[in-house]
Image (tube, rainbow, N blue to C red):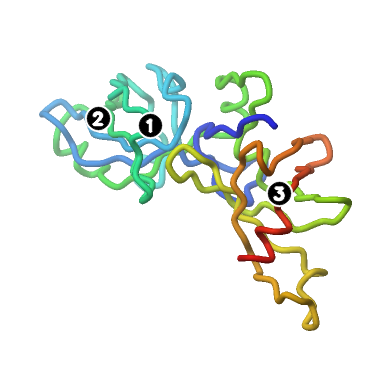
Amino acid sequence: MGKITKSPLNLPKQAETARIYIGKLGRSVGVNGALRVFLQTDFPQFLKQGVVLSTSHSLYPALEILEFQSAHTSNKTQSHQNTAPSTLISFKNITSKEQASQLTNTLLFSSVDSTRAVCELGEGEFFWFDIIGCKIIEEDTGLGIVSEIERIGSIDYLIIETNKNLLSADSKPKLPKRFLLPYIERYILKTHLETKSIFTQGARGILEES
């Protein structure tokens, strides 16, 4: 079946040139410009000294990492509200508490190219941005397209936009416009990125019961 992985976490429906959201800066810590950062990535080792991240801040559109201190918090501790582990990060040229305070709530981004270059996947693993846009196919029927992915606890759920051909007014039972499918072996038979296809079993049942 394989495993899908939060690279730096992927935003839905993004192109190869799009930015990839990896976390959000929290409050400043200490007097030297360090900040808490709430990560959304399975690759914290990606964040090293010298790595440049783009941001949502108009005054600081790019920041170079000076130091990164991991909190070593397991994904298993994340709540259903998608709370991310908090760690500390400091940036080049951000040297005071006053400067750091300006960055609170700033979003941090990587790029698809740098993600592929730095984050090494294991056998059968896939990036979230590769899974988004895949067709869900069951018994030669297209059930829909993966539009987003949400991690709840330790399980990744595919958020699927139902195939419009299945949404006719006379369809019985009446089907929802979207449904959630756990990315686990019980439902996922094979993921084929070359054709952007995920082959499933039991997904039609989830769709009809949603």
Where 32 sits versus 196, above or below?
Answer: above
Q: Are marks 3 and 1 in contact (CB under 8 Å)?
A: no
Quadrant of the snapshot with the N terminus: top right
Residue under label 1: 63
- Which label sits on residue 133? 3
Relative to the observer, which residue lies in front, 159 or 182? Answer: 182
- Which label sits on residue 94? 2
> In the image, what residue occupies the spot 77% across and 50% down?
135
> In the image, what residue occupies the spot 70% across and 59% down?
205
Quadrant of the snapshot with the C terminus: bottom right
Relative to the observer, which residue lies in front, 210 or 157? Answer: 210
Q: Do the residues labelled 1 and 2 touch (CB within 8 Å)?
A: yes
Estimate how packed mark 2 is, as few (under 14), some (14 to 19) or many (20 or more) residues with alpha carbons within 10 Å.
Answer: many
Q: Which amino acid does label 3 sit on?
A: Gly
- Mark 1 and mark 2 lie on one chain; the one further toward the N terminus is 1
Quarter of the image for residue 84 reads: top left
